[in-house]
Amino acid sequence: MSVVGEVSEAELQAAVSAARDRLNEHTLKTVHWHFSDDTGCPFWLEKKAELNFDPLKDIKSFDDLKKFPEFEDEWLRGGPIRRWVPKGHAGKPVYVFETGGTTGIPKSRMVIEDHWKDYELFSETLPDKYFPKGANWLMLGPSGPRRLRLAVEHLAQHRDGICFCIDLDPRWVVKLIKKGWMEHLEEYKKHCIDQAVTILTAGHDVKCMFATPKLLESLCEALEEKGTNLAEVGITGIFSGGTEFTSQWTRFCVEELLGGLPEESGIYMTPTYGNTLMGLACSKPITAADGYKIAYYAPQPRAVTEVVTFDDYNSVVGYGETGRVKLYTLTDEFFVPGFMERDEGERERPFHTYPWDGVSGVRPFHELASATTVGVY
Amino acid sequence: MITLNPLRWGKQYESLEFNDVVHFDTGEPIARVGTVGGGIVTRDLLKAHLAREALLAVPTEELIAMSKKAAELFEHATLTVGDSQQSVDDFVHQQSASTGLPEHMCRSNMAKNSFVLSRMDEILQCLTRGLDLSILSKGYGDEGRGVTVSYQAQTPILGAILPNNSPGVHTLWLPAIALQIGLALKPGSQEPWTPYRMVSAFMEAGVPAAAFGLYPGGHDAGGAIMTKAPRSMIFGSAQTVAQHSGNPRVQAHGPGFSKILLGDDIVDDWEMYLDVMVESVLSNSGRSCINCSGIWASRHTREIAAAIAEKIGPVGVLPPGDSNAQLAAFTVPAMATGTWAMVEQDLAENGVTDMTAEYGEKLIEREHCAYLRPMVVHANSHERAVAAKEYMFPFVSVVECPQAQMLRHIGPTLVGTVITSDESFITAASRCVDIDRLNVGPLPTNRLNWLQPHEGNIIEFLFRNRAYQIAPMPVAASSS
């Protein structure tokens, strides 16, 4: 019998099957919540009338979600934002988080507690050795109407820490790039990095941080110019994210910025993949032996990722094959029955920690790649 | 299939990411190029001073001798390039296959690059006005006039964002090595061949490997070179040039808008200069900034345009291996269709006539590439928009304009060939700040004398002439 990771193939298959059962059950519950008159949100209750099936009767499993038309992200542009608030959550305080927005109306998503829950789940995946409970955090990434800042701060608080935040406006960064104002871009980056260096060297006991790959590079460079480095200023755990987070970048970061894998450098870095719609997908631990491959696994059953064929978004590709990333959000706050991400990648097999499909090699979808600005902050 | 790895100060780096270089006509991959991101470039440029130190350890005259040897190797030898041995024929086939340039043009660009390298001593002699090159190494010295002169290097390395489709431009960065300035190059995604082969030739000739960085990659890698290198050159569009205008750290090379001006004194004999005009427009498939995009005269402009059209209008698409091939493919078909759309817009203006209309379809679309066949248009005034256009194929507008108004209206002109014996016109052309390289007489715009500076003197770009005073130190009383 072959053994995958720490469990046998049979045990893995059992876990996969159990996870699927849980997903089916969760799907049923979520659909009933969003399409019942007393708990659903105005948007989906209105949409129900346009569907040629009855979600309450005809959705019996996760696969049945393919009966829904493709979720159009245009639906998220413009208001009223209240149309997305489920009646079952009436009266609760509501956040709104936005994506894009450099020009035109940004896409917005309402959130009540999903960002907290997502990051609490993510917290369980962080090794305490490198992300010690009680340690303080630095959030070096997009702020403003993005959810990331509040989510990371909650993560820190959830782990008994306090989060220091740098204010960074990605919309201005994109504008600077489009205008070709590269000197301003450098100055703005420096402005952010200077603040980060100040915090890290001010005796605040910051051990953990979030940073985008670009800012992490700049931070390491700035620390080096001051004759120090991340380890010396006390950082032991980093989580980072973005489509520029490739195997090559990870290798560069581990080998040249951090000074080696955690056992050698004392710094653990974990890639994440996420957005305002889905939440946060975690990565299988990265190793040099595996070519620094990054495989992401969605926080099932609250969110699901599939890798689907380019010509039929309802057909999943074979393991190891390339396709477009399709996303499902199945929480009691937000329902997305299949949204085509602007990314592509390879379908990954389940493993013991995440007994469901993952996606690796995430990169901008080739048909949209030229129009996508990646790695801007 | 050949694999080209990034080179980090002479050391090959095996990237985990690759871009394929594909054949322009079949789409088949012909090379895998390992790529790096801006982080690696930034990190390497922190050590750029080591590249210069490695070169400073070799006397200038030895570097010049090595450059001459590199020229020989580049043009004639089989060299280690990436993981393969590359013969001259391999290089020509590969370059033609990825850029769409006919093979004989690849050979001619190869010869041009080699020629410049082989005459590096004369070129530096001319660019420095005969300066003792040890003054550049040491930073100061005496020219023999009893006055200390100082040239201070402004950068340990020259960064360059190299183009995809113009293998002739590499001559511009070649002098850096003999000037003891290292190189951080981002090869063009479709034309990695020249920088890789040239660096291999330099290293084979004995130049320290630590002087070279080759960083294939995306905009991120290029951006890092531009940001971190104190001096860099970039090749791009008019927009690219405008973006870097006034930035002393960047030398931007873009469209040349090179022109031929026919003086009133000779214009009635225009047929004598037809070959000069045709060569200026058609050479190198009209791709270079030194190709002529405008011919200005006060009269006979329709006849001139018709005569050029008769010569270049029939030129068609031939296989790249054909020695008669005159046209290069657009390896990105959308560039050809986009260019054609702009040309159609130009032709729609009153006063503009397509003089090549009778020579058939201009836009030839293939599965993986496209071609644009030569065009000559007539503009009845310098006010027509087409008078200020340059495209990446043999395209020229013949513009009717009184001689007295020409220099006021030609606009930026990289190479201006002024054919005249009229002294006052020559004087005015010599004073015209819109003309960069001035040719007086029947010289095709594409024939450059490499002993003259091109689009900015690289010595002035890399070094700063400054004051340097030395006073003898008094002997301290305690030492007596």
Image (cartoon, coloured by chain):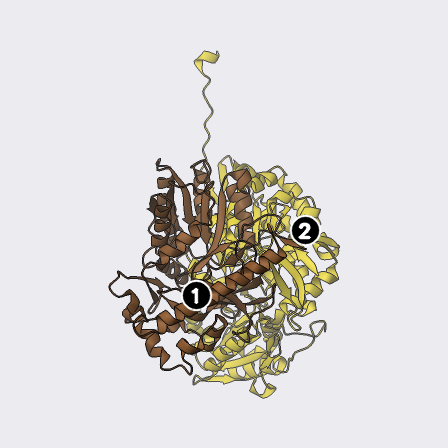
The chain to which mark 2 is attached is B
Q: Is residue A203 visible?
A: yes
Residue nearest the viewer, comparing B168 with B93:
B93
Residue B167 x/y as whole percent: 62, 62
Discs 1 and 2 lie in a common subunit: no
Residue bearing the label numbered 2: B200
Residue A19 x/y as whole percent: 51, 61
Q: Which chain is brown in the picture?
A: A
**Which residue is found at the position 29% from the left and 65% from the top?**
A89
Residue B180 x/y as whole percent: 58, 43
Q: Quadrant of the N terminus of chain A?
A: bottom right
What color is chain B drawn in?
yellow
What amino acid is at disc 2? Ser
**Side of B57 relative to A25 (left or right):** right
**Which residue is found at the position 24% from the left and 64% from the top?**
A91
Residue bearing the label numbered 1: A26
